[in-house]
Image (cartoon, helix red, strand yellow):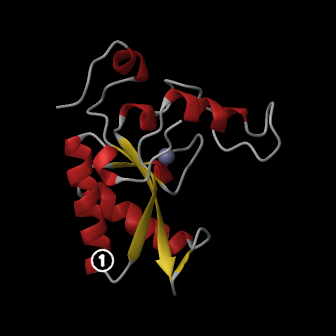
Amino acid sequence: MVNSRNITDLHPHVAKLCVAFIAACKAKDIDVIITSTYRDNDSQNALYAQGRTFPGKKVTNAKAGESFHNYRIAFDFCPVVNGKADWNNLNTFTQCGELAESLGLEWAGRWEKFKEMAHCQFTCGLTLAQLKTGKTIV
Ligand SMILES: [Zn+2]
């Protein structure tokens, strides 16, 4: 089961954007950590089971193959304040999200459904259905 937080496990183009994103945050005095990059299908299904057939809170609506993380083109981040991941600071998340957008990333903090402050992706407009057939970004 792979649930990576390594930037090198992302698609090379998205890895570059991720590095640029971290630098852009740093330039604004915001430290961020990357909490998730690539997940394999087993790992995605395990996450999906949480809050359904396994105890815990539901954390995703995506089964294997239905998350952009499965295609190496999404990552999750969290701002670090005083040495700790700060999941609750909406202002900082929004600042980071805007920096991500300025680099051409799609930030899920804007989504109306399943808003996810921590999630960024770069899909080139490809849908999951297209990715499932083996299509990939640039
Ligand atoms: Zn995510």
Residue at the outermost left position: 138
Residue at the outermost top position: 133
Please give the residue where the numbered disc 1 appears in the rendered image: 26
Quarter of the figure that contains the N terminus: top right
Please name the residue shown 52% across and 87% down the image.
82
Q: Taking 45 as reference, is 95 above or below it?
A: below
Is residue 104 visible to the viewer in this orientation of the structure?
A: no
Q: Residues within 10 Å of mark 1 (few under 14, many from 20)?
A: few
Residue at the outermost front position: 1
Q: Amino acid at mark 1?
A: Lys
Please name the residue shown 43% across and 34% down the image.
68
Question: x, y percentage for residue 130?
Answer: 35, 16
Q: Nearer the viewer, residue 91 or 72?
A: 72
Question: x, y percentage for residue 136?
Answer: 25, 25
Question: x, y percentage for residue 113?
Answer: 58, 40
Q: Nearer the viewer, residue 84 or 24?
A: 84
Residue 22 picture quarter: bottom left
Decide if residue 28 is on the left or right side of residue 84: left
